[in-house]
Amino acid sequence: MRKTALINGKVYVERGDFREAIYAEDGVIKFVGSNEAVKAMAGPGAELIDAQGKTVIPGINDAHLHFLFVGIGLSQVNTMGCKSMDELIQRCRDWIEKYPQLCKNGLFSMGYNEDLFTEGEKRSPNRYDLDKISTDIPVILARACGHIGVCNSKTLEMLNVKPGPLPGGGFPVFDDKGEPTGVFNEAVYYLKGVMPTYTAKDYEEMFMLANQHALECGVTSVQSNDLNQIVGKREDLQTAITNVYASGKAKVRYRHQICYYEPSVFEEDCRSGAFWQIAGSANNPRITTGPLKLFGDGSLGGRTATIRGGYKDDPGNMGVPNITPEKMLAFAKVADKYGVQLCTHVIGDQAIEDCIKAYEAVLHYGEKDINPLRHVLMHCQITDREMMDTIRKDDLIPCYQPIFLDYDMHIVESRCGKDLCSTSYAFGTADKLGIHQSFGTDSPVEDLDPFPGLYCAVTRLDKKGWPEGGWNPQECIDVYTAVDAYTVGSAYQEFAENTKGRIKPGYLCDLAVLDTDIFTCDPVAIKDIKCDMTIIDGDVVFERK
C-alpha cells in the first residue's frame, strides 16, 4: 500500500472549511483533518509532504483546451503579444534564422492578434506582409482565435486557390481585383495542408511539452479537443496519445473531446464501438473517451461568431456558421441514441440559440434528469437573460473561458452593442441561477495557466487593471465560486464530481499547492499566483525550485 501524508497546509475543503492535513492511500484521499490526526493515521512508511503553511486546492481541471496544440505551440515561434506588424514579421524572420531545420518545410504559428497592435497599422496581415518573412517556404499564421489564417504567396502558389467555399468549410478572401489576399476565414486546417504532417513520435514529444507546462500550472486534468480536422493524420495523433499514457510518461489526466464531420460516420463508429475505443489500449484510468465535439460558429475577434443582430461595427456581417441546424440536429439524435455527450463550440447568440434548439430536441423532458448526458455549450459568450434562463431550465452546462475577458471586454460592445454585452460572459448570473458552470482556457488560444482566468472571473478586470470597478461587475463571482468552477465544476462536466475536484475522503489525491493564499490575497494578485507543487495520485509530479 502506498501511503501519502500532506501536513502543515491550509487545505481547502469547501466554502469556509479549511483543514491542516491530508492522508491518502494508493492515490485516494482517506482523511482530511489535523496534522496530529493525519500523522497518527499515516504511521511509519508514509511519504510525508510538508506544505509549509501554503494554501492547497484541488488540482485544476481545464474543461476545454487543445492540449497537443499547446505542445506544438511550445515548439514553434511565439507570435502572441506582438505589438505591431513589424514585430510580428521580425519574430518570424528571427525564428527562421535561428532554427532553419525546423522551418525548412515551412513556418506555422498561432497567436497574433491585430487588435493588440499599438504601433503602425492596426490590421490583420495579408500575403504581402508575410512575403516579408519569406517567399521561399510556406508561411502560415493563425490568429489567436484559431478561426482566421493568413499565408504568404508561396503557400497560395502551392494551393492554387479559387473563390468559393472550401472542402470542410471556410473560404479564401479575394480583393476587389479578384486577387487572393492570403486571408482564409474558418479554414486554418486547409492552409496547414501544405505543411508536412508530424509523425507519431513528433506528437509524443509535443504532448510531453504540454504535459510539463500543465504540471507547472497546477493543472492535473484536461478535457481536450485534439482529434479534429486541423491535425494531418488522426491515426498518428491517436497512437501518440495512447503511447505516452501506456508508457507512464504522461501524468495529467486526459479526456478526449472528439470531432466528427458527418453524422453517418459518427453513427457507424458508435454502432461498431469504435468511438468508445478512441482512448486506445493504454489501460490507464488517466485517459478516457469523452464527448463528441462540434463547431457551431467562429470567433468574436475575427467577426465569424454568429450574432443574431449582426455586427454593430460591420453592418451586414452575421458571422460564419460552421454547421447547419439540420446537421447539428442529426448529430444530436445519434448522440442521444448511443448515449454520447455533446460539446459544441458556440460563441455568438445565434449559434447558442441554434445549439440549444438541437439539444432541446433530444432532452428528456418529464424525467428526473432532463439532461442525463450533460450536453455542453462551449464558450457560451454572447447571451441575454432569457437565454440564461433557458440554459437553467434545460440544465445545460456552459463551459466558460474567463481569461477571454482580458481581450474581449475591449471589443464586445463595439461588436454587439451595450445592452447585449451587459448580459454576456454571465458567470455571476449562472451562479445565481444555480447553473453548473465549468472553466477552461481554450489553450493555446490563451495560455493554460488558470490564475489569470480566475482573476478575470473574480474582478472583471483585464491584466492591466482596466476598467476601474470591473467590466459589468454585476457578473463578478467570488473566489470560492471561481475555484469551484475550475475544479469540481469541470469535474461535473466529465461525470467525475464524486471523484475529482474536492479534497475529501473518496476523492483522488490530485492537488495544487500555491505560493499565495488565493482566498485572502488582494484579488488583483490572483493573476500572478504560481503553483509551487503539483500532486497527482498522491505523488509529487512537479515542485518549483
Image (cartoon, helix red, strand yellow):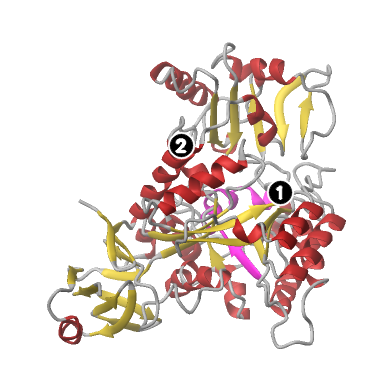
For residue 408, side relative to residue 444 (left or right): right
| Comes first in the chain, label 1 or label 2 | 2
Viewer-proximal residue, 92 or 310?
Answer: 92
Q: Nearer the viewer, residue 267 or 490?
A: 267
Could one spot residue 516 in this view of the protein?
Answer: no
Identify the residue shown where x is 31% and y is 82%.
Answer: 30
**Other-residue count near label 1 (Cα within 10 Å), few / some / many at <14 / 14–19 / ≥20:** many
Q: Amino acid at mark 1?
A: Arg
Tag 1–tag 2 contact (CB < 8 Å): no
| Residue 260 percent coordinates (x, y) | 71, 51
Neighbour tally class for label 2: few under 14, some 14-19, many 20 plus, Cα within 10 Å: some
Residue visible at 67% across and 48% down in the picture: 300
Q: Which mark is residue 492?
A: none
Mark 2 lies on a secondary structure that is helix
| Residue 538 position in % (x across, y down) | 29, 68
Q: Residue at x 69, y 17 (%)?
A: 158
C-alpha distance separating marks 1 and 2: 43 Å
Element marked by disc 1: helix
Mark closer to the observer (1, 2):
2
Would you identify the image quadrant in which residue 483 lies?
Answer: bottom left
Residue 466 location (% of width, % of height): 48, 53
The residue segment tinted magenta is: 397-415
* Res 185 visible: yes
Q: Quadrant of the N terminus?
A: bottom left
- Eyeballing the image, is 110 above or below 319? above
Asked if residue 233 is among those painted magenta in the image, a careful observer would answer no
| Left or right of 153 on screen, residue 518 | left
Q: Toward which corner of the image does residue 181 lie, by quadrant?
A: top right
Q: Which residue is mark 2?
A: 201
Q: Which mark is residue 415?
A: 1
Number of residue marks: 2
